[in-house]
Image: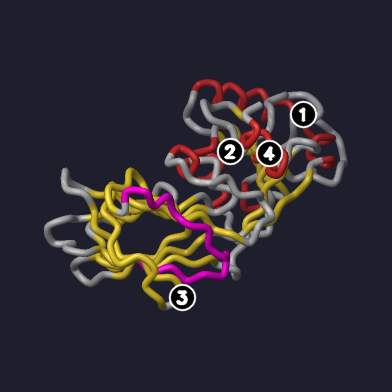
């Protein structure tokens, strides 16, 4: 065990079930003193972006930063893995504080479901029939009917995830914007979405929800058969991520945009 007395001397390690992540967990816990996440000054997450999102959700508003190391298949939110010099890396890392989206979904039975989303809130058709959606922003209808496979609202940190795959724009991490992006739109055929203020209140109504069911997903948490979804930034909630110098989210987003 390490006997260092550095600033981060209460480290918690969490790992996905992937073999590489479990091997890394064994290596790091053998080398460094560690505590339970409830007692930690920093949490080191070992896995991919899915594990990072899961860890951030578990520690919203705890004030404990999460430092990810990539032991999964996708690692946009992760740092490179190295078992050595962890304390020094943590001390030199840059911390970014961000706000999630809050999703309030009303299902067809009248039940209200509230979820938080770090990357995006997505709506998807549940059957072979396309979804029909009405979009309002700050109380004003902006698109009376979108016929598509679905729709998503992405944060800047989530703009390089599913949003990018759906041909949505990449947003700089500090930008006060949200990306509203259709998924395989049929009508209006040429509508490619919109950039909205991060202060916008977005309302999505599902038209004909009884015959064209739609699900709403906040990151990876799904609510089935929704009739209305409200989306807004939750400024009262914050999560903290740590990145090695020169590899923060701003730099990663620039790299994505220039295709390097």
- Of badges 4 and 1, the one in the foreground is 4
Image point (33%, 53%), residue name: 123
* Labelled disc at residue 1: 1
**Pointer 3: what residue?**
138
**Mark 2 or mark 4, which is nearer the start of the sequence?**
2
Q: Estimate how packed mark 2 is, as few (under 14), some (14 to 19) or many (20 or more) residues with alpha carbons within 10 Å.
A: some
Report, in whole angstroms, how far the alpha carbon at label 2 lies from the one at label 1.
18 Å
Instruction: Kindly check if marks 4 and 1 are in contact, taking CB atoms under 8 A apart as contact.
Output: no
Q: Is residue 101 above or below residue 122?
A: below
Q: Secondary structure at mark 1?
A: loop
Q: Position of residue 16 (x, y in %)?
A: 51, 33
* Labelled disc at residue 14: 2
- Viewer-nearest residue: 81 or 194: 194
- Of badges 4 and 2, the one in the foreground is 4
Q: Estimate how packed mark 3 is, as few (under 14), some (14 to 19) or many (20 or more) residues with alpha carbons within 10 Å.
A: few
- Of badges 2 and 1, the one in the foreground is 2
Instruction: Kindly check if marks 3 and 1 are in contact, taking CB atoms under 8 A apart as contact.
Output: no
Q: Can you tell which quarter of the image residue 251 is in?
A: top right
Instruction: Kindly check if marks 3 and 2 are in contact, taking CB atoms under 8 A apart as contact.
Output: no
- Viewer-nearest residue: 26 or 222: 222
- Numbered range of the magenta stretch: 189-204
Report, in whole angstroms, how far the alpha carbon at label 4 lies from the one at label 2.
29 Å
């Amino acid at each position: 065990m390490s006997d260092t007395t550095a600033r981060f001397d209460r480290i918690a390690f969490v790992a996905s079930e992937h073999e590489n992540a479990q091997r890394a967990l064994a290596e790091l816990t053998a080398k460094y003193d560690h505590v339970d996440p409830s007692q930690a000054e920093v949490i080191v997450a070992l896995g991919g972006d899915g594990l990072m999102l899961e860890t951030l959700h578990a520690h919203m508003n705890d004030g404990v930063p999460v430092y990810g190391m990539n032991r999964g298949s996708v690692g946009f939110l992760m740092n490179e893995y190295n078992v050595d010099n962890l304390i020094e890396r943590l001390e030199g890392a840059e911390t970014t504080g961000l706000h999630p989206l809050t999703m309030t979904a009303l299902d067809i039975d009248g039940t209200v479901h509230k979820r938080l989303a770090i990357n995006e809130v997505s709506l998807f058709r549940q059957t072979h029939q396309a979804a029909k959606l009405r979009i309002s922003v700050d109380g004003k209808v902006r698109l009376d009917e979108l016929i598509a496979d679905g729709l998503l609202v992405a944060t800047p940190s989530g703009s390089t995830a599913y949003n990018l795959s759906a041909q949505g724009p990449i947003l700089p991490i500090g930008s006060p914007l949200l990306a509203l992006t259709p998924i395989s739109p049929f009508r209006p055929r040429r509508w490619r979405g919109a950039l909205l203020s991060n202060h916008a209140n977005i309302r999505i109504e599902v038209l004909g929800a009884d015959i064209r069911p739609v699900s709403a997903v906040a990151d990876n948490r799904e609510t089935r058969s929704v009739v209305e979804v409200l989306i807004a930034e939750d400024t009262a909630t914050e999560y903290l991520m740590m990145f090695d110098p020169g590899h923060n989210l701003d730099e990663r987003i620039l790299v994505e945009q220039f295709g390097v």
